Image (spheres, helix red, strand yellow):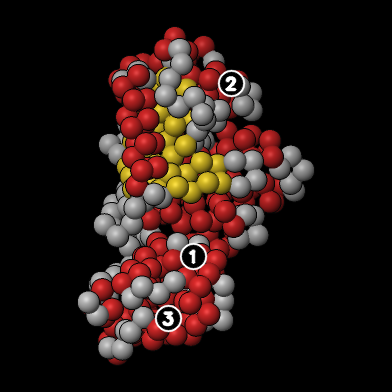
């Protein structure tokens, strides 16, 4: 099969921004390379780089140089001018800064990747056992959580960090909103963050968010005992583009894990399914939150 026959039509994802474009282009380049039986080492040599650089390009973790894309296309046998022009243009679009670029001084690289994926996702399922998920945090609760790690940040920086988090929440409203399904351990709601007033407002915020048709909130009560997610919090991101695999995201103190192999994502999906069955139903969870609002 000629490499050119493997060039699939690619288009910018709805709201996905540069991150998803990099992933789409990287996946296309990987298909072209493997169709020709070319190793990552040989591909790296062609663009004066290492095999690790090729791996990062194919995973969409770094930006593309148009010259590198052109050289790789030549190596992979893509000679049709229209095919080459389309992929090089995609590389140009993928290098455009996302809306979060103005916050780049606050963002570690590993989390900037997540924000791009979050912006591209159509469905996110998440389990949390310590904090309310960022997409569901009230401003005051977000400020209290952020201050745990940035307690010496100047007031202006703190407000920008809060603004970044609340801006991300726009994905829950508007045209083609993100579907969010969150399972919260009861400990998340019992742990007082920022004081009683902040927690009461946060519980009210969760109740209001749960009224959105695209948001599902479930509570995992203490009386359910142990459960499938004993290992800690995680999120599963699904995208509308069939070329993109589900991504499992697990945040750590100073880094994050991104898992995109099918076996890995299927395992976490099964765990999330079990959590959703074990937890209170959305209606029961809403009643739990309403009771909690009265006593917090």
Residue drawn at x 33%, y 32% as measured from the top left: 270
Residue drawn at x 22%, y 77% as measured from the top left: 1
In the rendered image, the vertical position of residue 133 relative to residue 23, given as above or below: above
What number is the disc on residue 55? 1
Q: Nearer the viewer, mark 2 or mark 1?
A: 1
Q: Which residue is mark 3?
A: 72
Q: Is residue 13 left or right of 100 when viewed as pictured?
A: left
Q: Is disc 2 in contact with disc 1, using a CB cutoff of under 8 Å?
A: no
What number is the disc on residue 70? none
- For the residue pair 72 and 208, the one nearer the viewer reads as 72
* Helix, strand or loop under label 3: helix
Who comes first in sequence, dot 2 or dot 1?
1
- The answer to whether residue 219 is seen in the rendering is yes
* Helix, strand or loop under label 1: helix
Residue 34 spot, x, y in % from top left: 35, 69
- For the residue pair 142 and 5, the one nearer the viewer reads as 5
- The answer to whether residue 19 is seen in the rendering is no
**Disc 3 residue crowd, few under 14, some 14–19, many 20+, Cα 10 Å:** some
Residue 130 spot, x, y in % from top left: 55, 28
**Disc 2 residue crowd, few under 14, some 14–19, many 20+, Cα 10 Å:** few
Q: Answer with the quarter of the image where residue 144 lies.
A: top right
**Disc 1 residue crowd, few under 14, some 14–19, many 20+, Cα 10 Å:** some
- Residue extending farthest top: 223
Residue 75 spot, x, y in % from top left: 40, 84
Who comes first in sequence, dot 3 or dot 2?
3
Q: Which residue is mark 2?
A: 191
Q: Is residue 88 left or right of 200 when viewed as pictured?
A: left
Residue drawn at x 57%, y 53% as measured from the top left: 110
Q: Quadrant of the C terminus?
A: top right
């Amino acid at each position: 099969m000629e490499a050119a026959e493997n060039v699939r039509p690619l288009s910018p994802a709805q709201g996905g921004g540069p991150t998803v474009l990099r992933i789409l282009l990287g996946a296309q380049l990987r298909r072209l390379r493997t169709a020709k039986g070319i190793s990552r080492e040989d591909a790296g040599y062609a663009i004066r780089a290492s095999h690790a650089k090729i791996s990062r390009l194919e995973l969409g973790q770094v930006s593309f140089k148009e010259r590198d894309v052109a050289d790789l296309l030549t190596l992979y046998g893509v000679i049709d001018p229209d095919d080459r022009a389309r992929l090089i243009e995609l590389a140009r679009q993928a290098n455009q800064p996302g809306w979060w670029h103005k916050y780049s001084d606050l963002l570690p690289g590993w989390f900037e990747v997540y924000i791009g994926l979050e912006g591209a996702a159509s469905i996110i399922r998440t389990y949390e056992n310590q904090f309310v998920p960022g997409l569901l945090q009230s401003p005051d609760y977000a400020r209290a959580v952020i201050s745990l790690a940035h307690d010496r940040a100047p007031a202006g920086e703190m407000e920008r960090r809060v603004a970044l988090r609340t801006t991300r929440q726009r994905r829950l409203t508007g045209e083609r909103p993100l579907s969010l399904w969150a399972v919260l351990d009861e400990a998340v709601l019992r742990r007082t963050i920022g004081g009683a007033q902040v927690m009461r407002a946060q519980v009210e915020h969760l109740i209001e968010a749960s009224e959105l048709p695209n948001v599902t909130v479930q509570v995992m009560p203490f009386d359910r005992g142990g459960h499938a997610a004993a290992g800690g919090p995680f999120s599963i991101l699904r995208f509308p583009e069939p070329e993109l695999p589900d991504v499992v995201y697990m945040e750590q103190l100073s880094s994050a894990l991104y898992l995109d192999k099918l076996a890995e994502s299927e395992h976490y999906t099964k765990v999330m399914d079990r959590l959703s069955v074990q937890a209170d139903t959305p209606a029961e969870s809403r009643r739990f939150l309403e009771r909690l609002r009265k006593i917090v």
